[in-house]
Amino acid sequence: MTLRHKDLRAVLAFVTDAHELDAPEQLTPELLDRLTGLIGCTYATFEAFDRPLRTVTAYVACSNEDPPSCPPFVAPERYWTGEHDPFLWTLRFDKWSDRVTRRERERIRDEEEFNAEFRVTDSIWLRVGNLHRRSACLKFDTQGCDFGDRERELARALLPHVDALWRRSVSRAQTNELVVAVARDGDGDAGQAIVLLAADGGVDDASPAARRLLGSWFGAEEGPLPPALEEWVVLARPGDRYTLRRNGTQLTVESAGEFTLTLTERRSEHPRLTPREFEVLLLVAEGLTNIEIAERLWISTGTVRRHLENAYRKLGVHTRTAAVARLGNV
């Protein structure tokens, strides 16, 4: 089906206004109201997701949904695993009536909570981003009748523009986080170690200092994040820290926001611990007793005691607890 010029002009006008919008989210209730009129649906809803964290990061509804009377959207566990709807995390475009019979949709409408409340009989989903990590969804719901070919083609015409709007929002968030990180960590010179993450969790850019530290600690200056950091980033929230230590030096990677990492390398001001003293302290930090440490390292308990005494003296402490606390600054 070929869309009418009137529909194409309406899509163009909507996209132009959406790109000119200066707001935290790329779609507002007012813009969603325009889409309900354009598509001819009852409800239009925009949602953004962080699937690894199983979190809905944004929820914007049209005025028909009457947001003040609707509780915040909370997704059940099966929503994230795909048991709720296996198509949710696989298809970028989905029209419910293309794959589910009207009788089954009416049964769901009458029996399931959301559909029973809003009397939804057909839906169209437009999904953008990395469906396994950060993503967003623009959804159209209708009551009483099914979406036809015109609505399908209109939604398909909107999909690349929704993707562009979402990526623009991500880029804005990246820029804001970067500005905050630079302001916090210094005067903006090249010595700052900052990594800017892409929407899919990969590396979008990194400062020379950050690449140097990644190469020094992980052996990977270029390319994607090292596997250990990549696994941590998936579940990291702003403010979380990932720490590595090796003989008198500590690397701290901090999640400065959803898209920004800062790296800090710090050297101890205290006399350097020997490798064995450091190893014994690490085992103390794990909660092992002197006897267990001796068994683990195949040394005597007296030797363990001597290593601890030397470490206490170098660190300026007198107890195991204080030594472990100081270990974070070594």
Image (tube, helix red, strand yellow):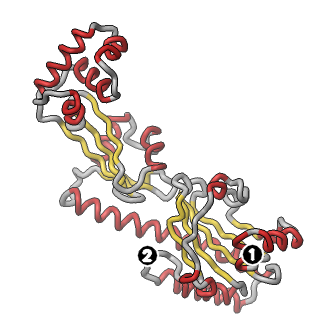
Q: Amino acid at mark 2?
A: Pro
Eye-nearest disc, 1 or 2: 1
Residue 207 in view, yes or no: no
Q: Position of residue 294 (x, y in %)?
A: 31, 12
Q: At 33% across and 44% down in the image, what residue appears?
A: 211
Q: At 54% across and 52% down in the image, what residue appears?
A: 52
Q: At 82% across and 83% down in the image, what residue appears?
A: 145
Q: Position of residue 37 (x, y in %)?
A: 67, 90
Q: At 57% across and 69% down in the image, what residue appears?
A: 73
Which one is nearer the viewer's eye here, 97 or 17?
Answer: 97
Q: Is residue 107 left or right of residue 76?
A: right
Q: Amino acid at mark 1?
A: Ala
Which residue lies under the disc numbered 1?
A: 116
CA gap, disc 1 and disc 2: 32 Å
Q: Secondary structure at mark 1?
A: helix
Q: Quadrant of residue 137?
A: bottom right
Which residue lies under the disc numbered 2?
A: 24
Which one is nearer the viewer's eye here, 115 or 34?
Answer: 115
